[in-house]
Image: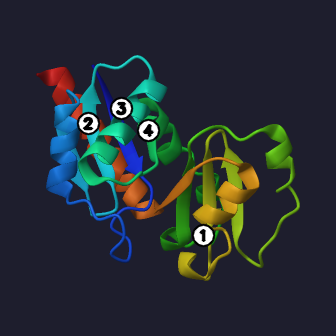
Amino acid sequence: MKTYLAILRGINVNGQKKIPMAGLKSLFEDLNCTQVKTYIQSGNIVFNQEVGNQEEQIRQIEKKIVDAYSFQVPVLIRSQPELAEIAQNNPFLKEKDIEIDKLHVTFLADIPSESNRDKLKNVTFGSDRFIIVGKDVYVYCPGGYGNTKLSNTFFENKLKVTATTRNWRTVNELYKMVESTAKERLNS
């Protein structure tokens, strides 16, 4: 049994793809997940499950959502160690004068190809910056995420992988939830 975070892309945004959190929790429990917890309405689910293959885990969750709600939702998964790495190693935190509330993480479904990463080496958007680390992108938007061109769609189009973004505060809350759930699992 391991602890995971599932991050759903594009639910409960502007009245689109509405999924109540109670329904989402139930859906995960139907997939033999335990200690299922949701965080805010944007599709963040922490859970324990005995799974060896994340690809299969993602397919099962996506199929269950289609069966229950009749629409597709991309699902990204991070294990407890992966999320710990993300939360503890944000390269922007090493810089001076970084505004924490302007930090975000764009989670990618896969590690982008080197050729697609290379296409972004010299891309700049004013003071907005990003750093790709594996299958995650650390994003800093001093003018606010709502005003940046460094959106999910930008990264999906350029890197050719599914992406979804969470602000740094949410990433840290999810990290705390994952760590707490893992401790509960070990103590039970």
Question: Given the image, on which type of amino acid does mark 1 rest?
Answer: Ile
Q: Residue at x 23, y 51 (%)?
A: 38
Q: Is the residue under label 3 in contact with that under label 2 (CB below 8 Å)?
A: no
Question: Given the image, on which type of amino acid does mark 4 rest?
Answer: Ile
- The disc, 2 or 4, on the residue closer to the chain's N-terminal end is 2
Residue that badge 4 annotates? 77
Spatial CA span between label 2 and label 3: 14 Å
Residue that badge 3 annotates? 60
Question: Given the image, on which type of amino acid does mark 2 rest?
Answer: Phe
Spatial CA span between label 2 and label 4: 11 Å
- The disc, 1 or 2, on the residue closer to the chain's N-terminal end is 2
**Marks 2 and 3: which is nearer the front?**
3
Residue 115: where, in percent of width, then height?
86, 42
Spatial CA span between label 1 and label 2: 32 Å
Label 1 crowd (10 A; few <14 / some 14-19 / many >=20): some
Q: Residue at x 42, y 33 (%)?
A: 59
Q: Looking at this view, is 26 or 104 the one in front?
A: 26
Q: Is the residue under label 1 in contact with that under label 3 (CB below 8 Å)?
A: no
Residue that badge 1 annotates? 98
Q: Establish if 25 lies above or below 169.
A: above
Residue 84: where, in percent of width, then height?
44, 38
- The disc, 3 or 4, on the residue closer to the chain's N-terminal end is 3
Question: Given the image, on which type of amino acid does mark 3 rest?
Answer: Gln
Numbered disc 2: secondary structure: strand
Using the image, tell me which numbered label, if any, was put on residue 12.
none
Tell me if I can see residue 71 in this picture. yes
Label 2 crowd (10 A; few <14 / some 14-19 / many >=20): many
Q: Looking at this view, is 116 or 131 the one in front?
A: 116
Numbered disc 1: secondary structure: loop
Is 113 situated left or right of 68 in this image? right
- The disc, 2 or 3, on the residue closer to the chain's N-terminal end is 2
Quadrant where the C terminus is found in the figure = top left
